[in-house]
Each structure stands twice: as C-alpha cells, then as structure tokens.
Image (spheres, rainbow, N blue to C red):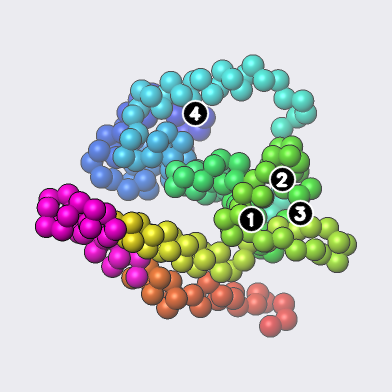
C-alpha cells in the first residue's frame, strides 16, 4: 500500500470517483490507499460536492510550505498509548477524519478538534491540561473552544475529586443537537408563514413561502419525534469485557 502524500494524479482519480458517485471506500480501494486518507482529503477540500483536484493539490502544497517555514519548538509528539489494544496511529488518523467531518458540517476547526478528542476517550471527559497536551495547542485555544462548545450544549463542565474542571461529552449531546436543530427549523417555519401574509396569499412568492413552511414543518416535527423515540439508543452501555465486573 503506498504511503506519503497524495499525488496530483491520485487527486484527479478521487475527483473522477466522486463525479461517478463512488463511495470513499471504493475510491480508496482503487488507489490502494486507506479509506481515511480519501475521506480526510475530500473533507479538507470543500467536501464531495465541491472537490477539485487542482485546487486541492495547490492547497496542500501551500500548507506544506507554511509547515516547513514554521520550525517546531519541540520534537513531534507521538500518538499517546491506547487502551484495549487499539492501534494508536489508527486512532490518531481516525480522530483527524472525525474532526474534518465536523468542520465540513460547519463547526470551527479548533472546536471540532476538542470535540473529537473528548468524544473518542472511553471516559468521555478530559481536563484542560489533558486537551492542551493531546492537541499540542495553547491553554487559551482550549478555553475558547470549550466556551463555544459549552454555549452550544455540546459539552458540560464538572469538577473531579481533585477539584479540577473536566469537560464532559454527555450521552444526550446528539439528542439535544437534534432537538435544537428542530427548534431552529420551527423558527424558519414561523417566519415563512408570516411572510405569506405580507406577500399576499395566492401570489407566486407567497405560495413559495407557504410550501417552504409546510415542508420544513414536517421535517422539524419528524426530526423531533424520531430523536425522542431513539433517545435511549444513546444510553446503551457496552457489555463488560472478560475479567471486569458487570
């Protein structure tokens, strides 16, 4: 399996695969590359719908030049040891992919990195010092990211036995996220319906707004209902491993 950076030719093959509607795994198989490599490449370069091989190649070269110019203060930190026999490098690579997917959905990069880092721990929580060490960023960057995630209900703060503040990813985070999305959509519905009266019912513009309101009303209601019905899935616990108490 080839290693190193993607070549321009490989990026062109990725673009052709995306245009043909191929899944990332199939594109990666044809390139003899890990699926995570293709996923990260696409997510870093505007996503599947806007991926352009030439633009992606130029952007990568630009990032490489900037990285060369910035001399590291310390030797690169190795991936931390992982429990349960996990491959540390595979976990690190997956964390990058998880981060890129969140960035593609609109989350700021540092916030996405912090979210991914906490989510992929077994405890679902980390202190500020642990985040700084794992991500190799400043305490101020972590503080800003946590403040944003806290304001969005994505993490919560708690004190451990040593009175240190820990940042926790709750089981209900994705449920709360879906509910918040449904609530925001409901506000659009209300605004659209208000516009129907302003633009005079029956006119093309008013009809367009009414159709938008009806569609989004159905979607938001279905989303909220499905989230409530599936909420217990987020609370499922793994079976104890052999040798551990149940």
Of the pair 182 and 158, the residue shown nearer to us? 182
Q: Which residue is mark 1?
A: 150
Q: Quadrant of the C terminus?
A: bottom right
Number of other residues with Cα within 10 Å of mark 3, as a class: few under 14, some 14 to 19, many 20 or more: some
Q: Work out whether residue 81 can be spotted.
A: yes
Mark 3 or 1, which is nearer the eye?
1
Query: Separation of disc 1 and disc 4 at Cα?
Result: 36 Å
Secondary element under disc 3, as helix, strand or loop, is: strand
Mark 3 or mark 1: name the one nearer the start of the chain. 3
Secondary element under disc 2, as helix, strand or loop, is: helix
Query: Separation of disc 4 and disc 2 at Cα?
Result: 33 Å
Mark 4 or 3, which is nearer the eye?
3
Assess whether mark 4 and mark 1 are in contact (beta carbons under 8 angstroms): no
- Find residue 4 and report its horizontal and vertical position in percent: 52, 29
Mark 4 or 2, which is nearer the eye?
2
Q: Which residue is mark 3?
A: 127
Question: The magenta stretch spans which residues?
Answer: 193-221
Q: Is residue 129 left or right of residue 92?
A: right
Mark 1 or mark 4: name the one nearer the start of the chain. 4
Q: Which residue is mark 2?
A: 143
Assess whether mark 3 and mark 4 are in contact (beta carbons under 8 angstroms): no
Mark 1 or 4, which is nearer the eye?
1
Q: Residue at x 36, y 46 (%)?
A: 24
- Find residue 216 and report its horizontal and vertical position in percent: 29, 61
Mark 3 or 2, which is nearer the eye?
2
- Identify the mark at residue 5; answer none if there is no mark: 4
């Amino acid at each position: 399996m080839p290693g190193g950076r993607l070549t321009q030719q490989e990026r062109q093959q990725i673009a052709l695969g995306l245009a043909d509607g191929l899944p990332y795994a199939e594109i990666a198989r044809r390139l003899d590359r890990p699926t995570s490599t293709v996923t990260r490449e696409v997510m870093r370069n505007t996503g599947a719908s806007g991926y352009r091989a030439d633009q992606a190649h130029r952007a990568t070269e630009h990032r490489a030049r900037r990285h060369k110019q910035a001399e590291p203060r310390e030797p690169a930190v190795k991936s931390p040891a992982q429990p349960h026999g996990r491959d540390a490098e595979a976990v690190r690579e997956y964390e990058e992919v998880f981060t890129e997917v969140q960035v593609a959905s609109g989350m700021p990069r540092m916030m996405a990195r912090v979210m991914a880092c906490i989510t992929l721990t077994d405890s679902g929580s980390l202190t500020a010092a642990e985040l700084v060490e794992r991500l190799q960023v400043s305490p101020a960057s972590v503080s800003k990211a946590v403040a944003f995630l806290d304001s969005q209900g994505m993490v919560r703060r708690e004190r451990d036995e040593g009175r240190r503040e820990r940042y926790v990813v709750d089981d209900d985070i994705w449920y709360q996220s879906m509910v918040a999305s449904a609530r925001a959509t409901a506000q659009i519905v209300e605004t659209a319906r208000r516009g129907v009266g302003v633009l005079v019912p029956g006119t093309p513009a008013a009809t367009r707004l009414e159709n938008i309101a009806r569609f989004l009303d159905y979607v938001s209601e279905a989303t909220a209902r499905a989230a409530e019905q599936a909420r217990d899935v987020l609370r499922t616990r793994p079976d104890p491993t052999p040798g551990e108490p149940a």
